[in-house]
Image: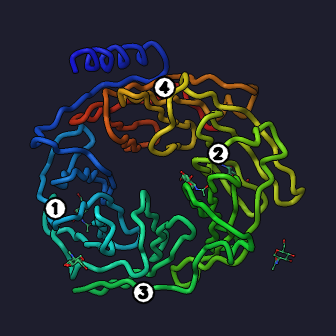
């Protein structure tokens, strides 16, 4: 443990030589076996979820309040997400035995730094597998399963809420393919002629990337078109398997995205829908032979790709998007952020150039990006 702590401290010093300055590392007074699981941001405050509590943090990582999450035998409440249109956040509790459906609680503000459960616990109909991620756009909640992405509508009144299933299921039939093995999905919205559109990328373990176009109707997503990106025609070996596809920018005519493989690093691509061309900007090298974990995070200027070794130490490769687009075919990271041995990473932005990442089992670190210009 001591060794790892020293490593973590060295890393913070190391990154100070470069273009990331980390100024606060905050250790929390956790219970035994308490573990950080997820994060969301609501009304300018940060919500940190552990396996036993919800913490409300300010930008200096001070705990403003905390309260216990509900406990149910065989369940872990392990995901939080903020509703983009209402002042509530959802907490997902998933069956660890996988016998029962997952369910959601809604939390609403109840005084300064106070939140209380709002309405009933709502079961997720037809969600059979545990999920690593959920995404909300407008009133729509998207939940991935191995072979499909389900879309629900959240209906919220002043005293209660519920979920409505929708016919919009993004599966092999919708994509007009024979099989689908989803490893991750990502969504990006853009506005054209006062109308909000969505572009979704789905990474498939063996087959690469599918895109879906959606449009916003009464604050709900309606998918209407799809296709496959021809990434195999590039320098990606046939043996490559795909972990995620992350959208950096999208418009009606193009999409800029990172495609992450398990073994061969990641690739920065741009697809033009007008010419039908896929352009490879650069290959983002891995950190040694470590395994990619968690998910890729980005802001306008930088991309963060985390890797983990067998001792569970995490190193995050940071890339500057601008330099990736300009001249680097095979890119080494601009900076590294290093964490002690942890099960899963959390990383989020509190402003354009400030981020927080999990630097230990019971600690978060705040850093500022210097010299990462607009891409
Ligand atoms: C959000 O935060 C502001 C300022 O901290 C506070 O006045 C307000 O009551 C909060 N809640 C909502 C629902 O906006
Ligand atoms: C989970 O399912 C089992 C068997 O169907 C049932 O006995 C149990 O009450 C369920 N638990 C919850 C929390 O719904
Ligand atoms: C679905 O795929 C098949 C085989 O690739 C093709 O012949 C057919 O035109 C496709 N259907 C649609 C609606 O795109
Ligand atoms: C589906 O993807 C998972 C990784 O998410 C992989 O472990 C599994 O082998 C894949 N299944 C098939 C049939 O390719
Ligand atoms: C995203 O794409 C749009 C349309 O091509 C462009 O106007 C905008 O500048 C891009 N944003 C970034 C951050 O690259």
Of labels 4 and 3, earlier in sequence is 3
Query: Are circles 4 and 3 on residues that touch, CB within 8 Å?
Result: no
Residue 6 percent across, percent down from the top left? 27, 14
Neighbour tally class for label 4: few under 14, some 14-19, many 20 plus, Cα within 10 Å: few
Residue on which disc 1 sits: 69
Choose between 175 and 339: the one closer to the eye: 175
The disc at residue 138 is: none
Mark 3 CB near ligand 2 (8 Å cut) = no
Query: In the image, is 294 to the left or to the right of 82?
Result: right
Which of the 4 quarters of the picture holds residue 279?
top right
Task: For marks 1 and 2, give the CA distance.
Answer: 37 Å
First reached walking from the N terminus: tag 1 or tag 3: 1
Q: Earlier in the sequence, mark 3 or mark 2?
A: 3
Task: Tell me the quadrant of the picture where the N terminus can be found.
Answer: top left
Q: Residue at x 25, y 72 (%)?
A: 105
Which residue position is annotated with label 4? 370
Identify residue for label 2: 241
Q: Secondary structure at mark 1?
A: loop
How far is disc 3 from disc 2 in space, using C-alphas?
34 Å
Residue ID for mark 3: 164
Q: Give residue 102's position: percent from left, percent from top.
A: 32, 72
Q: Secondary structure at mark 2?
A: loop
Q: Which residue is pictured at 51% across the width and 43% down the height?
A: 296
Q: Is there a contact, CB below 8 Å, between mark 4 and mark 2?
A: no
Mark 2 vs ligand 4: CB below 8 Å:
yes
* Eye-nearest disc, 1 or 2: 2
> In the rendered view of the protein, which quadrant contains the C terminus?
top right
Q: Position of residue 303 (x, y in %)?
A: 55, 37
Estimate the spatial distance between the alpha carbons at disc 1 and disc 4, rounded to whole Å. 37 Å
């Amino acid at each position: 443990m001591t060794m790892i702590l020293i490593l973590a401290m060295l890393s913070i010093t190391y990154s100070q030589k470069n273009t990331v300055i980390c100024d606060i590392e905050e250790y929390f007074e956790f219970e035994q076996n308490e573990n950080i699981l997820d994060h969301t941001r609501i009304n300018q405050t940060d919500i940190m979820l552990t396996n036993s509590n919800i913490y409300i943090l300010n930008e200096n990582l001070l705990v403003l309040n905390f309260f216990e999450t509900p406990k149910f035998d065989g369940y872990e409440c392990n995901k939080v997400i903020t509703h983009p249109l209402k002042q509530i956040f959802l907490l997902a509790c998933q069956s660890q035995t996988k016998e029962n459906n997952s369910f959601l609680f809604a939390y609403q503000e109840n005084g300064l730094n106070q939140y209380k459960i709002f309405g009933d616990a709502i079961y997720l109909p037809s969600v059979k597998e545990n999920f690593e991620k959920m995404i909300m756009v407008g009133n729509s909640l998207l939940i991935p399963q191995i072979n499909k992405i389900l879309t629900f509508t959240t209906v919220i009144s002043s005293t209660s809420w519920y979920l409505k299933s929708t016919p919009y299921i993004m599966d092999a039939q919708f994509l007009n393919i024979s099989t689908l093995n989803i490893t991750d999905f990502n969504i990006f919205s853009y506005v054209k002629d006062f109308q909000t559109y969505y572009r979704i990328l789905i990474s498939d373990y063996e087959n690469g990337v599918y895109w879906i176009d959606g449009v916003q109707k009464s604050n709900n997503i309606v998918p209407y078109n799809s296709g496959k990106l021809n990434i195999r025609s590039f320098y990606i070996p046939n043996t490559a398997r795909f972990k995620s596809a992350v959208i950096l920018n999208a418009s009606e005519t193009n999409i800029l995205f990172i495609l992450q493989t398990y073994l061969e690093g990641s690739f920065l691509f741009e697809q033009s829908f007008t010419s039908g061309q896929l352009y490879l900007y650069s290959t983002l090298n891995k950190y040694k032979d470590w395994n990619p974990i968690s998910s890729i995070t980005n802001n306008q200027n930088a991309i963060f790709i985390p890797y983990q070794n067998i001792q569970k130490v995490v190193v995050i490769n940071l890339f500057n998007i601008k330099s990736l687009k300009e001249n680097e075919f095979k890119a080494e990271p601009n900076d590294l952020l290093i964490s002690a041995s942890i099960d899963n990473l959390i990383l989020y932005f509190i402003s354009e150039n400030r981020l927080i990442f999990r630097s230990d089992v019971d600690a978060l670190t705040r850093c500022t990006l210097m010299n990462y210009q607009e891409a």
